[in-house]
């Protein structure tokens, strides 16, 4: 059976891989060139952070995140993708300590496991280079990060054929099954874009072992590690689908906050200033739904990496059900 997928972002590729493994012939059509992606998937910090997201996310996301966190290690090991699931740290400067207290209270009230208060010594053991600036914090167990660009590259080998520079209208594709994974560019009137800006730096003077979140009154800054002293610093969250270049304000705010986290960022080299648009529905929940005979998988918002395996599972359930029905009808 032939499956045509519009969009080679995270979901298009992950779904293509699963379909290929189950014997479907898959063609993925991607609008952009292979070497130059501006997709949300390429830009993302790709943290796997359900506890950090808890105060701002729906229970359904939490459930999908739990399933997905169980699935990720096997997928990433098979594809040889760097990742770390050693927990994340949340810290706050003295003047913002009340924000950390409030965040901690929210997590404790929800009786979530994996939230550990850190003394100065414990924090220094986990992240020695933060010890001179922070004397307490939270360790969120089980959280982590993955190297999204290595993942996207590795998926390219296993998700069927990708045809780059090939924009398509999913209603006009000719697969036995057609799937729309165009992210924020899908023509769904309910879909909106939420702009996010991130900075990628090479920081030879910084050695952080895990994602760090800095509580701040205006935004939640995070620093997500990559191999070889590369860090993704993010992210803004702006209700706009604009992909215009990063503003000076955003660059200043992100980089200043990173510098207050670790002085070593002062000498870091800025590799990229990136803008991505998160695809979101009004309830900020993903949807896997049939529209005019096309399976639309979208709305992963700020949780794409956190929940991708569960969303792919839901899409596969839909496709398997259709195939079973066609088989029965033709007998
Ligand atoms: C700044 C930022 C930080 C983020 N950080 C995190 C994080 O830490 N953790 C997390 O879990 N999530 C994070 N996310 C969210 C995550 O990146 C998204 O939820 C996820 O990437 C969405 O994937 P997608 O495949 O649905 O869409 P996309 O990645 O947008 O892919 C859609 C693809 O479709 C292609 N396309 C569009 N139109 C057409 C067409 N007509 N024909 C063919 N192809 C087309 C596009 O070029 C694109 O490649 C972040 C997002 C941003 C922007």
Image: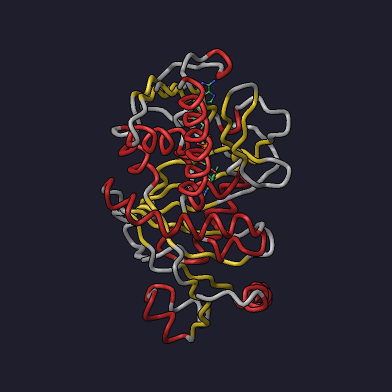
Task: Tell me where residue 124 appears, x and y as whole percent.
Answer: 40, 80
Residue 52 lies in what quarter of the image? bottom right
Tell which of 288 and 45 is nearer to you. Answer: 288
- Residue placed at 56% from the left, 29% from the top? 295
Counting labels gives 0
- Residue placed at 56% from the left, 47% from the top? 251
Q: Quadrant of the N terminus?
A: top left
Q: Is residue 160 left or right of residue 110?
A: left
Residue 274 appears anywhere in the view: no
Q: Is residue 185 above or below residue 253?
A: above
Residue extending furthest front? 331
- Residue placed at 43% from the left, 79% from the top? 131
Q: Is residue 251 left or right of residue 327?
A: right
Task: Tell me where residue 223 appears, x and y as whole percent.
Answer: 47, 58
Q: Is residue 38 left or right of residue 302?
A: left
The color scheme shown is secondary structure
Q: Is residue 155 above or below residue 86?
A: above
Tell which of 207 and 13 is nearer to you. Answer: 13
Q: Quadrant of the C terminus?
A: top left
Tell which of 54 and 40 is nearer to you. Answer: 54
Residue 278 appears anywhere in the view: yes
Residue 227 lies in what quarter of the image? bottom left
Tell which of 243 and 40 is nearer to you. Answer: 40
Task: Tell me where residue 7 appears, x and y as whole percent.
Answer: 48, 27
- Residue placed at 51% from the left, 50% from the top? 307
Task: Tell me where residue 200 appears, x and y as whole percent.
Answer: 43, 47
Q: Is residue 286 above or below residue 24?
A: below
């Amino acid at each position: 059976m032939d499956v045509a997928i519009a969009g080679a972002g995270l979901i298009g590729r992950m779904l293509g891989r699963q379909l290929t493994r189950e014997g479907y012939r898959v063609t993925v059509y991607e609008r952009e060139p292979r070497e130059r992606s501006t997709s949300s998937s390429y830009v993302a910090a790709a943290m796997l952070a359900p506890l950090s997201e808890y105060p701002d996310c729906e229970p359904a996301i939490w459930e999908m995140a739990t399933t997905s966190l169980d699935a990720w290690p096997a997928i990433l090991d098979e594809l040889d993708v760097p990742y770390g699931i050693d927990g994340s740290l949340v810290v706050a400067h003295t003047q913002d300590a009340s924000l950390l207290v409030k965040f901690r209270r929210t997590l404790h009230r929800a009786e979530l496991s994996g939230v550990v208060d850190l003394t100065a010594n414990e924090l220094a053991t986990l992240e020695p280079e933060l010890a001179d600036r922070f004397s307490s914090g939270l360790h969120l167990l089980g959280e982590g990060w993955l190297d999204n660009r290595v993942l996207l590259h590795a998926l390219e080998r296993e998700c069927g054929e990708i045809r780059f520079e090939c924009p398509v209208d999913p209603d006009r594709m000719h697969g036995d099954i057609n799937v729309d994974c165009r992210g924020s560019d899908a023509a769904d009137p309910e879909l909106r874009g939420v702009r996010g800006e991130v900075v990628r730096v090479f920081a030879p003077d910084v050695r952080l072992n895990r994602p760090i979140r800095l509580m701040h009154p205006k935004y939640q800054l995070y620093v997500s590690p990559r191999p070889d002293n590369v860090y993704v610093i993010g992210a803004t969250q702006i209700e706009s689908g604009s992909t215009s270049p990063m503003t000076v304000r955003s660059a200043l705010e992100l980089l200043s906050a990173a510098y207050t986290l670790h002085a070593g960022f002062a000498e870091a080299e800025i590799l990229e200033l990136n803008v991505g648009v998160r695809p979101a529905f009004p309830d900020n929940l993903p949807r896997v739904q049939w529209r005019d005979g096309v399976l639309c998988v979208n709305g992963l918002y700020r949780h794409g990496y956190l929940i991708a395996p569960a969303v792919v599972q839901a899409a596969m359930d839909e496709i398997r059900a259709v195939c079973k029905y066609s088989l029965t009808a033709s007998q």
